[in-house]
């Protein structure tokens, strides 16, 4: 594999060296490549998202909306030079609501990005809109999830325009959907003999609606922005597992799952210049998230009736409020200083109930931490400076995070954390479309509040307990990026990275077969990432392009049971994809084919080792222009129906004793999704 990677890299470097670099401008360490709206005409885009997805050498980062605060939620996108301040909506959601007709140009920014308030990003797309009248997009979809025969429908409607000198954007999305998985599973004993066969089908359908509204523009000396969003969903279904032990008539195990919830968010920004060298921005936001779930396990031995065995009930209520202030100062020649202060208040209330039928009706089972409230007050202060030393542009930052977490209920705990977060990014423009970026930064992971509360996995018959003593991971990353842009469309990016991880989060053993989320010590990861975009005209595919992405890594942490090194749980050694696309601007016909593959993501419990996630599949679509404002798209996802394979080995007692109890080997198939989209603009 290493030889293949080296050979591939050498070939790509040769191709790049023979190409003509794209036009770009590099000023003070920041390189900008501008793509006017006409560049995207070949892709006949309906929305800004269609345009951004076809930027050469750029992958949209939707951020992590599960993070508390704004720190990691903005991704690598700017709209009219401003970062995305919404949390409930991802950058993809926002771009999907901007009609392509509103986009004047997209500027790809690389290198020194001080003053943009996008932490740890060195490649950013800035979508610049043009002032115009009312415009909009709509989409009607029909989906069929084979082998199910039903047709599921949906509607997206977006309207953009101006009123009273402000720009508004309103969106509505609604529809229904299906999650459908089939699996053949074998259970083997310690000698490898098949002792049970299982035929499993998971089917869960649901419906949703999402409404959103944004308003932004100039009010006097202030740049203002307002956003609101409401989301609701309901799901119902479960899994039917036909289990046939060898030599037995067998039985059906039915796992029911009914869940639903809603969330809403309201936020606003206000930005203005305070003096010739000072500017300030204030961001405020509040959001709520409600979720309820009811699970059950029932057993049926034909011809006997179904008997309910276990019922679970889970409910959570989460709320978050954020206030953030940013100050920029350009009064020192050659420097751009930025200060930020963010305060976040988060609360999670959860209730979990477990009820078991012991033959006399359902009786509640006491679970530690079943009723819990977790709250956090978090403050984040940072200062950054962008400057140059000779030909090298530098972004230097120092942040400090203070957090206090209180937990009440089944577990009672109060803890405080203080962590420093330094960072340095150096960028060197080498000319001819080449840039080298080196970075060192320390980041602090945010604890998942759901790791503090108790729940159950009915599929694997496991109880998950919360851990009030969990510490956040801290990661120090060293990264080197070489980027080359060539011709109009071509780009190549090679990234080498190494991480030192303190207090790795994983599962800690308690007793018997119980385990909790916990910290297992320090670890590391390192690897290589490749991103490549090439035009295919030279090989006879006119107006064609190929986009290839791959990531390889190696990781290590000392296992808390054996004391021996192993890989980090839940992380893949490799993943990759290759997409070929061809557009015919004259006829309005487009086709695309994407193949992707991912490695296993292993998990290590007290009494088991679980390998799951490996898969390979293909997505494809064709699109036809019916008129200047109307397009029809037909496509398929999961063409091969290759689901994530699983190999679960469960031991008698701790897995380090090596006494295998049984092994579950599963081959799963995802539904083949066939979709038809009718898209229009107005």
Image (cartoon, grey):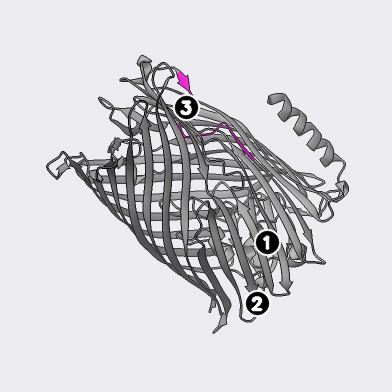
Q: Dot 3 surroundings within 10 Å: few (below 14), some, or many (20 or more)?
A: many
Q: Which residue is mark 2?
A: 131
Residue 166 x/y as whole percent: 55, 79
Q: Which quadrant: the C terminus?
A: bottom right
Q: Which residue is mark 3?
A: 523
Identify which residue is drawn at 44% across, 40% down.
Answer: 420
Residue 226 x/y as whole percent: 47, 71
Residue 409 x/y as whole percent: 19, 45
Residue furthest out toward the bottom: 164
Q: Dot 2 surroundings within 10 Å: few (below 14), some, or many (20 or more)?
A: few
Q: Are marks 1 and 2 in contact (CB under 8 Å)?
A: no
Answer left or right for 486 relative to 510: right
The mark nearer the N terminus, 1 or 2, is 1
Q: Dot 1 surroundings within 10 Å: few (below 14), some, or many (20 or more)?
A: many
Q: Tell me how far mark 1 sits from mark 3, CA to CA.
A: 39 Å
Q: Which residue is mark 1?
A: 51
Indicate the secondary structure of the residue bearing disc 2: loop
Identify which residue is drawn at 82% across, 46% down.
Answer: 432
Q: Which mark is residue 299?
A: none
Q: Which quadrant: the N terminus?
A: top right
Say whether residue 318 is magenta: no
Indicate the secondary structure of the residue bearing disc 3: strand
Q: How many numbered markers are drawn?
A: 3
The mark nearer the N terminus, 1 or 3, is 1
**In the rendered image, the vertical position of residue 650 relative to residue 440, given as above or below:** above
Q: Are marks 1 and 3 in contact (CB under 8 Å)?
A: no
Indicate the secondary structure of the residue bearing disc 1: helix
| Residues rendered magenta in the picture | 565-576
């Amino acid at each position: 594999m290493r030889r293949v990677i080296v050979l591939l890299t050498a070939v790509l470097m040769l191709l790049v060296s023979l190409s003509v670099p794209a036009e770009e401008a590099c000023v003070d360490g920041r390189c900008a490549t501008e793509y006017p709206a006409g560049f995207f005409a070949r892709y006949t885009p309906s929305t800004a998202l269609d345009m951004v997805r076809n930027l050469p050498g750029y992958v949209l980062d939707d951020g992590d909306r599960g993070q508390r605060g704004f720190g990691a939620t903005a991704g690598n996108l700017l709209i009219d030079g401003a970062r995305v301040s919404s949390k409930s909506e991802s950058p993809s959601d926002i771009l999907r609501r901007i009609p392509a007709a509103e986009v004047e140009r997209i500027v790809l920014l690389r290198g020194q990005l001080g003053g943009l308030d996008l932490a740890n990003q060195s490649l950013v797309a800035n979508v610049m809109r043009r002032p115009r009248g009312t415009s909009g997009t709509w989409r009607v979809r029909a989906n069929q999830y084979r082998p199910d025969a039903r047709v599921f429908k949906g509607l997206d409607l977006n309207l953009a325009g101006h009123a009273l000198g402000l720009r508004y954007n309103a969106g509505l999305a609604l529809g229904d959907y299906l999650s459908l998985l089939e699996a053949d599973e074998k259970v083997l004993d310690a000698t490898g003999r098949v002792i049970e066969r299982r035929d499993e089908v998971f089917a869960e359908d649901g419906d949703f609606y999402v409404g959103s509204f944004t308003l932004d523009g100039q009010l006097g000396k202030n740049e203002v922005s307002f956003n609101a969003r409401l989301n609701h969903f309901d799901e119902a279904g479960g899994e039917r597992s036909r289990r046939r032990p060898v030599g037995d008539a067998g039985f059906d195990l039915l796992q029911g799952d009914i869940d639903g919830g809603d969330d809403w968010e309201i936020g606003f920004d206000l930005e203005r210049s305070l003096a010739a060298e000072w500017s300030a921005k204030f961001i405020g936001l509040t959001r709520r998230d409600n979720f309820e779930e009811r699970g059950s396990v029932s057993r049926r031995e034909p011809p006997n009736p179904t008997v309910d065995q276990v019922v679970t009930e889970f409910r959570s209520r989460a709320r978050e409020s954020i206030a953030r202030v940013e100050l920029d100062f350009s009064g020192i020649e050659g420097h751009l200083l930025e200060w930020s202060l963010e305060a976040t208040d988060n609360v999670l209330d959860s209730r979990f109930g477990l009820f078991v039928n012991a033959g006399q009706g359902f009786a509640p089972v006491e679970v530690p931490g079943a009723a819990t409230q977790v709250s956090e007050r978090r403050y984040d202060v940072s200062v950054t400076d962008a400057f140059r030393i000779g030909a090298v542009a530098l972004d230097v930052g120092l942040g400090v995070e203070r957090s206090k977490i209180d937990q009440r209920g089944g577990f009672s705990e109060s803890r405080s954390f203080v962590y420093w977060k330094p960072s340095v990014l150096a960028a060197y423009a080498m000319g001819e479309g080449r840039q080298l970026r080196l970075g060192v930064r320390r980041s602090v992971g945010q604890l998942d509040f759901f790791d503090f509360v108790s729940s159950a996995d009915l599929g694997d018959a496991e109880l998950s307990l919360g851990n009030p003593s969990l510490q956040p991971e801290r990661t120090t990353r060293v990264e080197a990026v070489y980027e080359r842009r060539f011709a109009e469309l071509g780009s190549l990016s090679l990234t080498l990275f190494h991480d030192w991880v303190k207090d790795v989060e994983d599962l800690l053993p308690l007793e018997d077969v119980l385990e909790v989320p916990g910290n297992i010590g320090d670890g590391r990861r390192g690897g290589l990432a490749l991103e490549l975009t090439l035009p295919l005209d030279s090989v006879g595919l006119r107006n064609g392009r190929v986009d290839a992405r791959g990531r390889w890594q190696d990781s290590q942490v000392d296992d808390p049971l054996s004391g021996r090194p192993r890989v980090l749980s839940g992380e893949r050694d490799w993943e990759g994809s290759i997409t070929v696309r061809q557009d015919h601007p004259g006829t309005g016909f487009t086709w695309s084919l994407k193949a992707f593959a991912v490695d296993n993501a292993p998990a290590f419990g007290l009494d088991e080792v679980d390998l799951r996630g490996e898969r390979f599949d293909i997505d494809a679509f064709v699109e036809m222009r019916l008129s200047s404002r109307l397009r029809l798209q037909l496509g398929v996802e999961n063409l091969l129906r290759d689901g994530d394979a699983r190999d679960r080995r469960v031991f008698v007692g701790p897995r380090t004793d090596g006494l295998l109890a049984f092994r579950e080997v599963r081959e799963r198939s995802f539904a083949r999704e066939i979709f038809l989209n009718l898209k229009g603009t107005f």
